[in-house]
Image (tube, grey):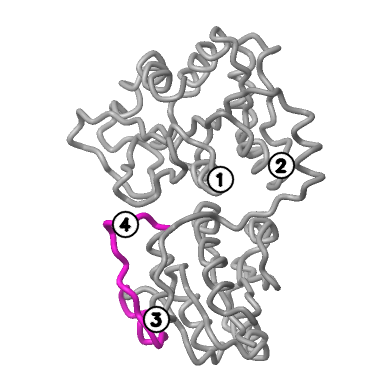
Amino acid sequence: MTKILIIQTAYIGDSILSTVLIKPLREKFEHSEIHILTTNALAPIFELTPVDKIHIIDKRHSSLTAQLRLAKKLRLEKFDIVLLPHRSMRSAILAFLSGAKIRIGFALQLKCIFFTHCVKYDMTKHEAQRFLELLEPLGIDTEVTDFPFLPDRQNDDAMRKTLPKNYIVIAPGSVWFTKRWPIAYFSELAGYFINDRQHVVLIGAASETELCEEIVKNNDSQWIYNLCGKTDLQQFFIAVKHARFVVTNDSSPVHVASAVGTPAAVILGSTVSEFGFGPLAQGSIAISNETLSCRPCSIHGLNACPKKHFKCMLELTPKKVYSIIKENFV
């Protein structure tokens, strides 16, 4: 039996995209155990996939003693292969200390000294495809096809009963200011959909509740289902899965939509699709202001516009965005 560990402790989107590794590993190593090392916050993502065991790292306690204790625990598992889609030095060191004979990561900075195989991080490709290239030293050459998420059938049926039969998902949140289309714009866009007699389902984290409430307040609430902060991760996935399409900022709902095969209209401000984090579902589109020379200004997003005008978002008016969406999805 081959024992494989995937280390991913970054963000929700990165974790979702990392799951593309699971299916080809299963196909290559029929008699295998696939383990994940991740955080408590990210573990629910991997609980929706066919992995055998999840190990938890508490990044708040990163003392040398804690790291050595975790490394000892990993070493006792006797892994044959460790894969590192997460590009951190701590993860690289843990992979080395695991004692695995094969350790594969990206050829970035000094981390390669901890790996047996270094893979080029190709900036021209989508992040999910970059992750799959970590499998090439194992003789696996594949492209992104699907994601191995397995929502519980009972949960799926129960969730669908609470939702309208035909709806559009709006996800208005993002951690970063420069990635957030103004909430007043989202509210107006929801109004256009409602005028077309389309139900709107709002989703997001509990911290984004006020954003969603603003949309409800400014529209006919009988057409809006506000699930913001009210779903667990599996319900979040199910709500996106059964939507006609998703309208979202450049944030984790993009990758949820990719994972369940729902088309997404992604509104881009400070970032661009060329970074490799765009939607993958067929029919998806990216909407952005192509007239500005200052884009992109950040790969992750910023807390304020460096130019202080925020034209990348403000000039993407609700009417413009609605017109593009209607042309592509209606």
In the rendered image, residue 255, in percent from the top left (x then y), is placed at: 51, 47
State which tag comes first along the sequence, 1 or 3: 3
Q: Earlier in the sequence, mark 1 or mark 4?
A: 4
Reading the image, the residue beneath label 4 is: 125
> Which of pointers 1 and 3 indicates the residue nearer the eye?
3
Residue drawn at point x = 37 percent, y = 79 percent: 111
Stretch in magenta: 108-128
Label located before the other in sequence (4 or 2): 4
Spatial CA distance of label 1 from label 3 is 28 Å
**Location of the N terminus (image quadrant):** bottom right
Disc 2 residue type (three-letter): Gln
Q: Mark 2, residues whose alpha carbon is within 10 Å: few (<14), some, or many (≥20)?
A: some
Marks 4/2: CA–CA distance: 30 Å
Under tag 2, what secondary structure?
helix
**In the rendered view, would you say 104 is above or below 171?**
below
| Side of 173 where 66 appears, left or right | right
Classed neighbour count for the residue bearing mark 4: other residues with Cα under 10 Å, few (<14), some (14–19), many (≥20): some
The span from disc 1 to disc 4 (Cα, nearest Å) is 19 Å
Residue ID for mark 3: 137
Q: Which mark is residue 51?
A: none
Label 1: how many Cα within 10 Å (few below 14, some 14–19, many 20+): many
